[in-house]
């Protein structure tokens, strides 16, 4: 009998890579892993809202080929790292070569940047940023290093050895510039120098250890799951996913600092270009139905669909079950619901609802929806 007890231990060496970059929309790996225990080794898995790639990493643990799509460049960059297996020495050497042989083309200099990072640390971050931006396509070692930097770009100041590059910030999302500067000034928090290379070396030991599972085939696409074309070479046997809650439409703004590292502007872009439409519950349901319809076109007969979904009390008048049932019905592609069960209250430390905790006051129970293509 296979021992799956490791999956409950998020710091187990086999699954540490899954936490390479904190991302507030993440669901626990136990969810897709437990679902996919029922898959055959030849099955192909798809997540149309792949986020940081938890479904894809669970698939890798089980030796399954997987694909993912997300509209957020940060999500794509992090999820891509879940499919690589590199030697830590290769990542460390690449980082060292860039820092010692590469000069940044631009270093931002507004008040935010002066308070967010020590000047020398910021220069080193910009060296890596510009190196990646000059590449048309990244290899596995470059993907791994980029994900490590994204995961350490901002976070809390630790009492001992530094784990993040920034002044005091949350680790899952980027606070806005004006708020950040006011906070740092009020608390007299001056950014400390952080040795970027030493931090990368520390992270590679942790994430790219000898217990990592073998790599499996797959691909992570940056795009819109409502419309993304037939770019995948395989049809899907499993769709395991967790769509954004209705009203949760600030992904880009909440990840603005990581998006800057990936090539976006060095201030918050408040324009809204979302994968799903959040103008009203009706528009949201229609938008979500297009995802289920588009995915069905790429599925094998009798493919299975498993959805974890919740709601924000301050935003949604309908229950999660009502929204999902309406979206599946509207897709007009014969998704047959087999079972809907409670998944309990979301964990505040790692769920997208945490962004609205203060406004909402409480969480709505999440549900797990099990369906198949009829």
Image: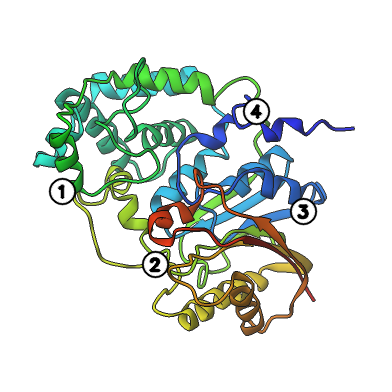
> In this orientation, which residue lies closer to the viewer: 150 or 77?
150
Q: Which circle's residue, 4 or 1, is located before the other in the chain?
A: 4
Label 4 to label 2: alpha-carbon separation: 33 Å
Q: Please give the label number shown on residue 178.
A: 1
Residue for point 25% across, 18% down: 100
Label 3 to label 1: alpha-carbon separation: 48 Å
Q: Secondary structure at mark 1?
A: helix
Q: Position of residue 259 (x, y in %)?
A: 31, 48
Label 4 to label 1: alpha-carbon separation: 40 Å
Q: Secondary structure at mark 2?
A: loop
Q: Which circle's residue, 3 or 4, is located before the other in the chain?
A: 4
- Circles 4 and 1: CB atoms closer than 8 Å: no
- Circles 3 and 4: CB atoms closer than 8 Å: no
Per the image, the residue denoted by label 2 is: 274
Q: Which circle's residue, 3 or 2, is located before the other in the chain?
A: 3
**Residue found farthest to the right:** 1
Q: Secondary structure at mark 4?
A: loop
- Circles 3 and 1: CB atoms closer than 8 Å: no
């Amino acid at each position: 009998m296979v021992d799956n007890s490791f999956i409950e231990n998020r710091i187990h060496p086999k699954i540490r890579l899954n936490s390479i970059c904190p991302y507030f929309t993440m669901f626990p790996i136990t969810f897709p892993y437990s679902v996919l225990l029922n898959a055959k080794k030849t099955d192909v898995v798809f997540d149309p809202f792949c986020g940081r790639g938890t479904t894809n990493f669970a698939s890798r643990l089980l030796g399954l080929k997987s694909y993912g799509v997300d509209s957020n460049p940060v999500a794509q960059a992090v999820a891509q790292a879940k499919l690589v297996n590199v030697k830590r020495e290769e990542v460390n050497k690449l980082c060292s070569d860039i820092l010692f042989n590469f000069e940044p083309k631009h270093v931002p200099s507004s008040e935010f940047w002066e308070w967010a990072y020590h000047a020398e640390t910021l220069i080193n971050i910009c060296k890596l940023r510009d190196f990646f931006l000059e590449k048309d396509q990244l290899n596995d070692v470059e993907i791994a290093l980029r994900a490590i930097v994204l995961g350490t770009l901002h976070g809390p100041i630790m009492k001992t050895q530094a784990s993040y590059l920034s002044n005091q910030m949350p680790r899952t999302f980027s606070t806005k510039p004006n708020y950040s500067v006011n906070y740092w000034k009020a608390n007299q928090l001056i950014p400390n120098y952080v040795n970027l290379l030493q931090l990368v070396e520390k992270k590679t030991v942790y994430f790219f250890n000898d217990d990592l599972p073998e790599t499996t085939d797959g691909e992570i696409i940056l795009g819109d799951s409502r419309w993304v074309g037939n770019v995948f070479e395989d049809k899907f046997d499993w769709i395991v996913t967790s769509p954004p809650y209705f009203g949760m439409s600030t992904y880009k703004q909440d990840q603005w600092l990581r998006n800057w590292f990936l090539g976006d502007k060095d201030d918050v872009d408040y324009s809204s270009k979302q994968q799903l439409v959040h103008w009203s519950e009706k528009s949201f349901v229609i938008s979500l139905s297009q995802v289920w319809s588009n995915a069905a076109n790429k599925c094998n007969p009798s493919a299975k669909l498993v959805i974890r979904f919740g709601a924000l009390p301050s935003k949604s008048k309908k229950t999660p079950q009502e929204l999902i049932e309406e979206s599946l019905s509207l897709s007009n592609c014969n998704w047959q619901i087999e079972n809907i069960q409670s998944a309990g209250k979301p964990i505040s430390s790692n769920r997208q609802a945490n962004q609205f905790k203060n406004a909402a006051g409480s969480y709505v129970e999440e549900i797990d929806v099990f369906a198949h293509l009829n």
